Image (cartoon, grey):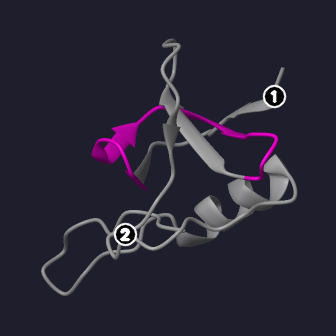
Amino acid sequence: MIETVELPDKAVIMTTEEGTVSGLLDIAVDESGAGLVRYRGTDAWLTIGNLDDEPPAVWAAVADLVSAIEDAAGAKDIAGNAIPFET
């Protein structure tokens, strides 16, 4: 079973399967190092990706991924739109 961390605040994250997800999210890293995200209270995991459709980053630990997401939280573009976290 993979370690799951609940993000304490709402986040906006880019996924390869669904595009942007936002709200109360759980984060994990699978055995290959891929970052995963799901809506809290659901079972469906999505891969954290990027707009350029490049291979996603590999993470050594879920704590590293959570730290990166928290560091990027609240970023906005020039028009004031939330910028999703990407890997």
* Magenta-span inclusion, residue 15: yes
Looking at this view, name the residue that lies furthest to the left: 79
**Which residue is more in the foreground, 35 or 24?**
35
Tell whether 43 sits left or right of 18.
right
Discs 2/1, front:
2
| Residue indicated by mark 2 | 53
* Residue at the image position 54 percent from the left and 68 percent from the top: 87
Q: Secondary structure at mark 1?
A: loop
- Kindly identify which residue carries mark 1: 2
The relative height of residue 6 versus residue 21 in the rendered view (above or below) is above
Q: Is residue 21 left or right of residue 63?
A: left
Disc 1 crowd rating (10 Å Cα; few below 14, some 14-19, many 20+) is few
Residue 47's spot in the image, x, y percent?
A: 51, 45
Q: CA distance from mark 2 to mark 1?
A: 25 Å
* Residue type at numbered disc 1: Ile
Q: Name the residue rendered at 72%, 63% in the picture.
A: 58
Q: What residue appears at the point 47 percent right and 32 percent down from the top-left corner?
A: 24
Span colored in magenta: 14-33
Residue at the spot 80% in from the left edge and 48% down from the top edge:
62
Name the quarter where the N terminus is drawn.
top right
Q: Considering only vertical position in the picture, is 37 above or below 87?
A: above
Q: Amino acid at mark 2?
A: Asp
- 78 up-or-down from 13: above or below: below
User: Are the residues at dot 2 and dot 1 in contact (C-beta closer than 8 Å)?
Assistant: no
Q: Of marks 2 and 1, which one's residue comes earlier in the chain?
A: 1
- Image coordinates of residue 71 in percent, x first then y, are 62, 70
Q: What is the magenta segment's predominant secondary structure? A: strand
Q: Position of residue 76 (x, y in %)?
A: 31, 75
